[in-house]
């Protein structure tokens, strides 16, 4: 499964084969069951995940204890509690396995070492950060500008996989709508 | 004013003096009056700004025509309509000068060229993206977890300059609260 990640690096960066293997060696396979909590709020996030199969989500809790899901990453994508991973500061988010998953985890220490040793890894990280920013910015804007129905329709168009695979509870918390509203939208 | 930016690069990256001067040469001084619109929604954002003096903000409009301010960058900071700048896609945000400002603008073309030619510039961009992501993520979370009062108090603690320098209209649109609510909070 890490082969797909290696292929991604070959296509999008100037990393040579020797370096790609060095990078791949830093990713350790971690099989986790659905619902496993990988990072708790308050933890310092020490790992970055490439999703071989399954998926993860990040979420935080509102004052009223409601979950707000933010990042969803399914197989072929990568993710973590990024703010905590960057600053090595206590996380305000949780990271949870959405399904039984095969994750490839790289430690923060190795991640940073590769940034110094392999210029192409910096290039990969740059692309990852650009995408993460665009995603966050879109999310921030959609929550203020789109109605519940529009957010659901946009997700159906852009990420139909999410609707097929995520539970209503998680989908609703990703769209910032109530589960009853989601059920109503789905039944239409 | 660009001297401060050069100093920042010296301290935070491994860029040598020759390269720093090459980078500085790409930044063109742009004096703009308060209220100048630098990027309109729908434009492709072609420039990245280092703020010599004054400041800029990015904002978008809700369906009801209400402004939501997102990024505020005052002197010594940098910014632009980043999603559009990254993807060279039509912007969903506006960029506006908050005050009479001296901006140092680098074109998208030169910015990308420097990423290829000067490894330390990639390093700078990386740090910029990390900060931009952390800022966005915090904003996204605060809007769901903090009350109007808590958001105002947090801003007063973290960014007192914003409260001193921004108009109530812009401050309210940054905090996602009504102007009347802001006036009430300020008078307390």
Image: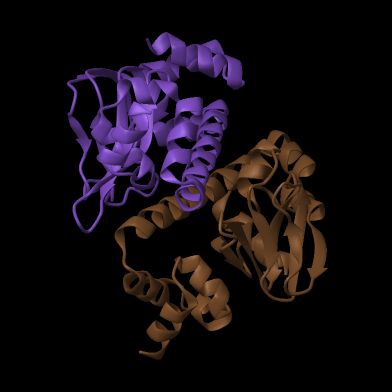
Chain colours: A purple, B brown
Closer to the camera in the image, A142 or A84: A142
Q: Residue at x 53, y 18 (%)?
A: A9
Q: Residue at x 29, y 42 (%)?
A: A59
Q: Position of residue A14 (x, y in %)?
A: 62, 21
Q: Residue at x 73, y 74 (%)?
A: B34
A122 horizontally vs A175: left or right: right
Residue B14 can be seen in this image: no
Q: Please, is residue A85 above or below residue B135 in the view?
A: above
Q: Quadrant of residue B188?
A: bottom left
Q: Position of residue B133 (x, y in %)?
A: 48, 48
Q: Please, is residue A116 above or below residue B111 in the view?
A: above
Q: Please, is residue B92 above or below residue A49 in the view?
A: below
Q: Quadrant of residue A148?
A: top left
Q: Position of residue A10 (x, y in %)?
A: 56, 14
Q: Residue at x 72, y 38 (%)?
A: B112
B40 horizontally vs A185: left or right: right
Closer to the camera in the image, B7 or B173: B173
Residue A178 can be seen in this image: yes
Q: Position of residue A56 (x, y in %)?
A: 30, 28
Q: Please, is residue B35 above or below residue B168 in the view?
A: above
Q: Quadrant of residue A80?
A: top left
Q: Quadrant of the N terminus of chain A?
A: top left
A64 horizontally vs A85: left or right: left
């Amino acid at each position: 499964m890490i082969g797909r990640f290696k292929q991604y690096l070959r296509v999008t960066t100037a990393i040579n084969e020797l370096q790609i293997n060095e990078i791949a060696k830093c990713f350790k396979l971690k099989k986790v069951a659905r619902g496993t909590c990988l990072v708790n709020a308050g933890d310092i996030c020490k790992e970055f995940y490439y999703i071989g199969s399954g998926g993860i989500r990040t979420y935080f809790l509102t004052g009223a204890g409601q979950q707000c899901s933010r990042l969803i990453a399914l197989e072929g994508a990568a993710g973590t509690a990024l703010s905590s991973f960057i600053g090595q500061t206590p996380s305000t988010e949780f990271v949870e396995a959405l399904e039984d998953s095969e994750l490839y985890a790289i430690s923060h220490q190795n991640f940073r070492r590769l940034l110094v040793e392999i210029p192409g890894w910096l290039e990969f990280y740059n692309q990852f950060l650009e995408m993460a920013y665009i995603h966050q910015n879109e999310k921030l804007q959609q929550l203020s500008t789109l109605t519940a129905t529009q957010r659901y329709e946009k997700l159906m168009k852009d990420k139909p996989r999410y609707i097929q695979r995520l539970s209503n509870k998680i989908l609703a918390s990703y769209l910032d709508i109530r589960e009853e509203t989601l059920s109503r939208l789905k039944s239409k």
